[in-house]
Image: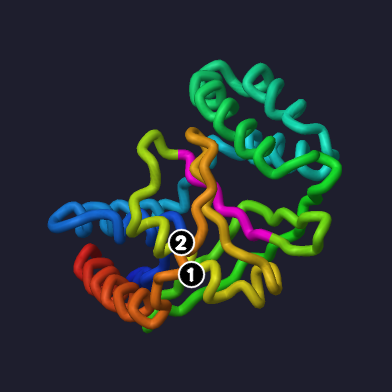
Amino acid sequence: MTAPTSAAPLTPYATLLGFTRYVDRTGPTKATFVGGLRKQRASRHGFNPHGQFVKALKADIAFHTGGTHLAGVADVVKPRWRPLYQALVPGATAWLESLGEPAGIDLAQTRDALAMLGDLPVKINPHFGVRYADGHAEAVRLHFDEAPPSEEATLATLHLMARHMDAVLPHAEPVLVDVRRGEAHRMPDTIKPEQVEQWLAGEAAAFRAIWSTAA
């Protein structure tokens, strides 16, 4: 009789959302958070409640409809998600209007990329891209949480997107949109990329170490 083989260990891995939420935490909460990510990956369970919302927002950009799809999206989701969608629509509509005339913007296709922070793979996955009439483009990542994105989470998100923009959407600028407040965050001119890189490398090394001990 053949002895049962043990399952292969889960290699450390994070999505952009998971890693930026991790850097936002301090002390023991970091370990708890990474342990939760590891269990979620092991169970292969996950659900994105924002899927239909993102589709509606992208449709308004692609079809130059100025918020028509957003206005109706809360009515077509399951009742349990309606309060969430109703909380998101006003800010998203305000951001959409801030882009200018609907006919002057187009949806741009983005691609996911895999960043390596030391030995930690991080999936870089913007929600979509926006291209303007003058030719410049933005790769957009959406922030849905009730609290605004912290300075650390914003900086990590924008830096990692910028770092892999050649693969994500060449020549584009990374933008983090705080959906509930309709605010767009861009990389400050005063930030030194090498310092951010050093900070994130340290965070990634700690993430790997916690992941290994959470088995």
Question: Can you give x and y, in whole percent of width and height, for residue 93 in the image?
Answer: 64, 31
- Residue 47 visible (yes or no): no
Residue displayed at 51% across by 58% down: 186
- What's the amino acid at mark 1? Leu
What element does badge 1 sit on? Answer: helix
Q: Is residue 24 above or below residue 52?
A: below
Question: Can you give x and y, in whole percent of width and height, for residue 141 in the image?
Answer: 56, 53
Q: Label 1 near label 2: C-beta < 8 Å? A: yes
Farthest-out residue, left: 28
Question: Can you give x and y, in whole percent of width and height, for residue 74 in the image?
Answer: 63, 21
- What's the amino acid at mark 2? Thr
What element does badge 2 sit on? Answer: helix
Mark 2 lies on residue: 157
Per the picture, the main secondary structure of the magenta-coloured stretch is strand
- Residue 74 visible (yes or no): yes
Queried whether the magenta region covers residue 140, the answer comes back as: yes
Q: Is residue 213 above or below residue 184?
A: below
The answer to which of 104 and 211 lies nearer the viewer is 104
Picture mark count: 2
Magenta residues, as a range? Answer: 138-144
When asked about the image quadrant of residue 21, the answer is bottom left
Residue displayed at 44% across by 55% down: 17
Residue displayed at 39% across by 77% down: 192
Label 1 crowding class (10 Å Cα cut-off): few <14, some 14-19, many 20+?
many
When asked about the image quadrant of residue 79, the answer is top right
Residue displayed at 36% across by 38% down: 147
Mark 1 lies on residue: 160
Queried whether the magenta region covers residue 10, the answer comes back as: no
Q: Is 215 on the left or on the right of 20, as rendered? A: left
Quadrant of the drawing holding the C terminus? bottom left
